[in-house]
Amino acid sequence: DAVFVYHNVTPAREAWRWSPLVAFRALAAAFQLRLIPKDLPWLAVSEFNREELLRFGFRTVETVPLVFEEQAKGKKSDVPTLLFVGRISPNKNVIELLRTFCSVWESSSPKPRLVLVGARKRWCRYADAFERELDSCPAREDIVWHASSMRYIELQGLFRSAWLYVSMSRHEGFGAPVCQAVSL
């Protein structure tokens, strides 16, 4: 009488360099999916995840659509503001996002602002490298990082005021921030 909900497993190749243990967990998760009986019912949180489960051989897989409250339009910030929402992890590619932003920032007038919303894990080497990159970035004064959780209403305000949503993610299984950005 169980229904399984699948968010996805980030491919192990995304974690090898930064955390071999996380990469091994990803491999173990893929192995576990191969062992689970294929007639069990699943809910996938995106069509991407549904297709992944079907490739594993599961027969009963339904997609649960992303549902967002109707978004009210808001005033854009006075400064060109770019927004990223997501974890500070290798597959989100936020170090490269910082580098790209710094390059754009150096040649821009007026100077844009980058707002990052995303937590880091305590012992994550990638997050340590991200923080070093952030601290050494010449555009540091125009970068705001919200590393702790924030209320949904505050997050909605950031989406409304941003000029552009940015992401350099190499793997998305759910994509909620992108969908929220598009919905405004």
Image (tube, rainbow, N blue to C red):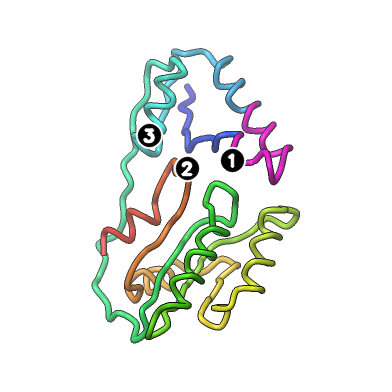
15 left or right of 11?
A: right
Name the residue: 51% across, 81% down: 142
Kindly identify which residue carries mark 2.
171
Question: Gap in Å between the C-alphas at discs 2 and 3?
Answer: 11 Å
Within 10 Å of disc 3 (Cα), the crowding (few <14, some 14-19, many 20+) is some
Instruction: Say which element carries label 3.
Output: helix
Q: Residue 140: image x %, image y %? A: 58, 78
Instruction: Say which element carries label 2.
Output: loop
Give the amino acid type for the residue marked by disc 3 in the picture.
Answer: Phe
Instruction: Say which element carries label 1.
Output: helix
For the magenta stretch, what is the residue range?
13-27
Marked residue nearer the N-terminal end (2 or 3) = 3
Q: Residue 170: image x %, image y %? A: 48, 45
Q: Which corner quadrant of the image does residue 130 belong to? A: bottom right
Q: Work out whether residue 57 or residue 101 is closer to the camera in this orientation and state it.
A: 101
Give the amino acid type for the residue marked by disc 2 in the picture.
Answer: His
Q: Residue 138: image x %, image y %? A: 58, 78
Name the residue: 39% across, 76% down: 81
Give the amino acid type for the residue marked by disc 1 in the picture.
Answer: Glu
Mainly helix, strand or loop, the magenta region? helix
Kindly identify which residue carries mark 1.
14
164 left or right of 88?
A: left
Q: Which corner quadrant of the image does residue 182 belong to? A: bottom left
* Foreground label between 1 and 3: 1
Residue contact between numbered discs 1 and 2, judged by CB atoms under 8 Å = yes
View extreme (front): residue: 107
Q: Residue 12: image x %, image y %? A: 61, 34
Q: Work out whether residue 2 or residue 7 is closer to the camera in this orientation and state it.
A: 7
Kindly identify which residue carries mark 3.
48
Question: Gap in Å between the C-alphas at discs 1 and 2?
Answer: 9 Å
Marked residue nearer the N-terminal end (1 or 2) = 1
